[in-house]
Amino acid sequence: MANLDYVLNHFAFNAVAFIRDYWQQKPCVIRQGFIDFQDPISPEELAGLALEPGVDSRVVSQQPSKQGHEPVWDLQHGPVEDYTQFGDQGWSLLVQAVNEHYPPAQELLRAFRFLPDWRIDDLMVSYSTANGGVGAHLDQYDVFIIQGMGRRVWQVGPRADYEVFCPHPDLKQIRGFVADLEVELEPGDILYIPAGFPHAGFSLEPALNYSVGLRAPSQAELLSAIADEALDQDKLQQRFRDRASDLLNTNGNELNNDDPWFISDAVIENFKALILEAFDNQQDVKRAIVNLLSRNPRPPLPEWPQQPYTESALSYALERYDILLKAVGVRMVSTRLNDRHYAVVQGNWYAIDDEDAEALFVILLEMTDFIDLNDCKPYLESSQARQLLVGMLNEGLFLLDNEGHHDSDSTAESDSSH
């Protein structure tokens, strides 16, 4: 299927008004958010993709409820080869991170760049038969649901405390769901659902849906990232120290050891102060958070060269190859740290202070699966640009190749000659 350009209909959607009035506040429906919407993938291609190694997929199905009983739900993890077992209605195939495995689908995410790149997690694609769905549930992240082929009804309820239960060990649903919004989506329509709003959907006919999931790190993830950075850099080594007030009574003239096994609130406050001191260095905290946001939660599979590339030998290697390939799922961001401009790729930092290095970074960022090497060569007069490309080649995140021929051994051959 040819690559398609997806542009939000500016007559139906205004990014400023959306962020001001709806973003993380309340659901909204964007009718014909995409005009003349064309599916980037067909049901057959989606089923084929779900068979490939490393692709996360599942089929959720339900049997009609008997009178007075809830439906019987089932979930089968992929790969699934025989869909006839599920019948002709009441089931959905869901495939995660389709944008990372099927390049044409990446174009759909570009339409949502009114939000920062690091905010966008992945594109989940689902194919549902009539009455197919996954039941009422909660998501802890914001989501845009784009209707492709077919029609689907969505119901959204208010934020509240709901009882979570599992009709299948791998399927979470909620009880007590009552919708205050019900909408039928047609191709090109978009439904935005903020985190924490319960929702349920079912197809009226065979349908494709595209769910743009937004990334929102938790406090635990952020603290873990800062701790990992500190351990990697051998930082935050200050140890706990007692204060006299922790060991003496209020008057300060007697030991406070009547209950030596008891941990007081004062001691906890001392520990809390020690933890908070870890956040005093703005640059260290920034580096840890940027590292986290530059990494894909689904790490790409690198293809390392057998011998490392060098900056001096790069021009020779480039003469032997036609294209530059990008590993599936590479995340790339940029930031400023200590007055320098950096590209950060899967936690790897590269200075891009000059125009050529920055331009090359943008080219590599915007590419989907591969580009012609001639698009890169004009920028490689810059040492920083060469270091950026060499670094990513040596990390196995990008790969030199010849058009129509993928052979990692040939990369190693070119390097071993230097």
Image (cartoon, rainbow, N blue to C red):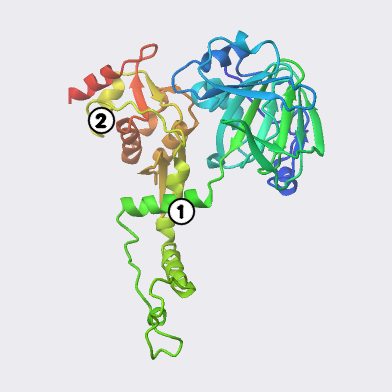
Disc 1 marks which amino acid?
Leu
Q: Is residue 194 above or below residue 329?
A: below
Identified at 40% across, 82% down, the residue is 256
**The N terminus lies in quadrant:** top right
Examine the image and state in which quarter residue 195 appears: top right
Label 1: which secondary element: helix
Look at the image and tell me whether residue 357 can be seen: yes
Examine the image and state in which quarter residue 361 appears: top left
Q: Which residue is mark 2?
A: 309
- Picture coordinates of residue 414, whole percent (x, y): 23, 21
Disc 2 marks which amino acid?
Tyr
- Picture coordinates of residue 41, whole percent (x, y): 60, 17
**The C terminus lies in quadrant:** top left
Q: Residues within 10 Å of mark 1 (few under 14, many from 20)?
A: some
- Picture coordinates of residue 26, whole percent (x, y): 74, 44
Mark in the foreground, 1 or 2: 1
- Picture coordinates of residue 123, whole percent (x, y): 58, 29
Identified at 39% across, 43% down, the residue is 352
> Mark 1 to mark 2: distance in Å?
35 Å
Say which label, 1 or 2, has the lower sequence index.
1
Q: Is residue 281 above or below residue 409?
A: below
Examine the image and state in which quarter residue 310 appears: top left
Q: Which residue is mark 1?
A: 223
